[in-house]
Image (spheres, rainbow, N blue to C red):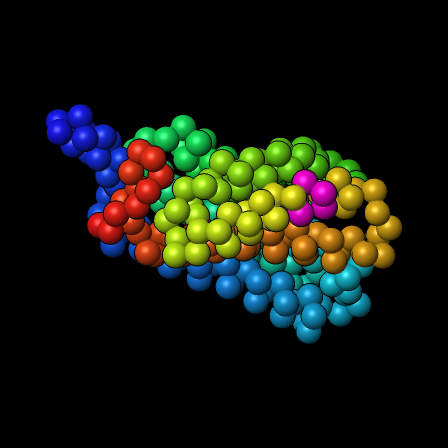
Amino acid sequence: MASDDNARQSTRTLTQPWVLKMLGWFALACCVFVAATDLILGFFLQKDYSPISDTISDLAAGGRYAIWQDFAMETFAIAVVLTGIGLLLARRSGARWIAGAAAMILTGVLVFFIARWDEYGDLDEGGWVLHYRMVYLMAALVPASLLLLRRDIARRSDHDRAIRFVFVALAALWVLGAPIFYFMDTAFDGLVERALAAVMLVWIAICARSLTKERQLDEDGGTNPL
C-alpha cells in the first residue's frame, strides 16, 4: 500500500489545476491569434503577396506588416514554451513525457529566436543567418516530441485512438514535408510551409487543450480526475 501511495505521489501535478488550465487556455488563444494574423496579412492586407508561393518568412522579413507577423510568431513561440512547461508541471515522472515536453520547450525557444533575430536566410549581408540552422533543429524536435508525448496525451484525452493516430500523422507529415520544402519549386513553398505550420498549431492546440482538462497521470499512463 505504501509503495502505491509513493507511486501516486510521484506523478501528482507540481501546481494547482487552475494554473494548468490558465496555461492551456492562454496557449490556445495564442494559436488562434497566430493563425488569424497569417490569414489576415497573407490573404488580405499585404500587397503583391501570395500565400501559395510566398512563405511566412517572406511576410515577416519585410514589408508594412512585418512587425505584426513577427509579433504573432513570438506570441506563438511563447505559447509553445508555456505548453511545454505546463506538461512538465502536470507530471513529475516518465522519461518520455519529460523528454517530449522538453523538446516542445526547445522548439518554442527556437521559434522565438527566429522571430526576434529577424534574419530569415534571405541572403542579406551583415547578419548572422541563424534561420536555417534553427529550422534544421526543429525538423528533429517536432516529430520527436509528437511521438514521445503521443501515448500519454492520448490517455489524458477522451479520444484515445484518434489522438494517437493524429500525432503519428502529424509526425509523418512533418518528416516528409520538412525536406520537401527545401527542394520543391518555389511556386508552392508558401503552401508547404503553411502546412508544416499547421502541424505545429494542431500539435500545440491538442496539448494545450489537454491542460485545460487536467487529469492526474499514473505511472502506467492511466488517468484519474484531479
Q: Is residue 176 magenta?
A: yes
Please say if 203 is above or below 35.
above
The number of numbered discs placed on residues in the rendered structure image is 0
Q: In this image, 169 relative to 33: left or right?
A: right
Left or right relative to 210: residue 126: right
Is residue 79 within the magenta segment?
A: no
In front of the other: 80 or 91: 91
For the residue pair 104 and 43, the one nearer the viewer reads as 104
Residue at x 68% of width, y 73% of height: 44
Give the side of residue 218 with respect to residue 208, left or right. Answer: left
Q: Residue at x 68, y 40 (%)?
A: 175
Q: Is residue 205 above or below residue 103?
A: below
- The residue at 44%/62% (across/down) is 29
Q: Give the x, y percent position of residue 85.
A: 38, 41
Q: Position of residue 28 (x, y in %)?
A: 44, 59
Query: How far across and down, in percent of the image, does residue 120 sit?
Result: 70, 44
In the rendered image, residue 121, in percent from the top left (x then y), is placed at 74, 41
- Which of the 4 image quarters holds residue 51? bottom right
Any part of residue 85 in sight: yes
Vertical relation: 42 (above or below) 158: below
In the picture as drawn, the residue positioned furthest to the left comes out as 2
Q: Nearer the viewer, residue 158 or 39?
A: 158
The answer to whether residue 76 shows anywhere in this view is: no
- Looking at the image, the residue that sits furthest to the top is 3
Magenta extent: 173-177
Quadrant in which the N terminus is drawn:
top left
Rendered residue at 62%/34% (across/down): 140
Q: Main secondary structure of the magenta part?
A: helix
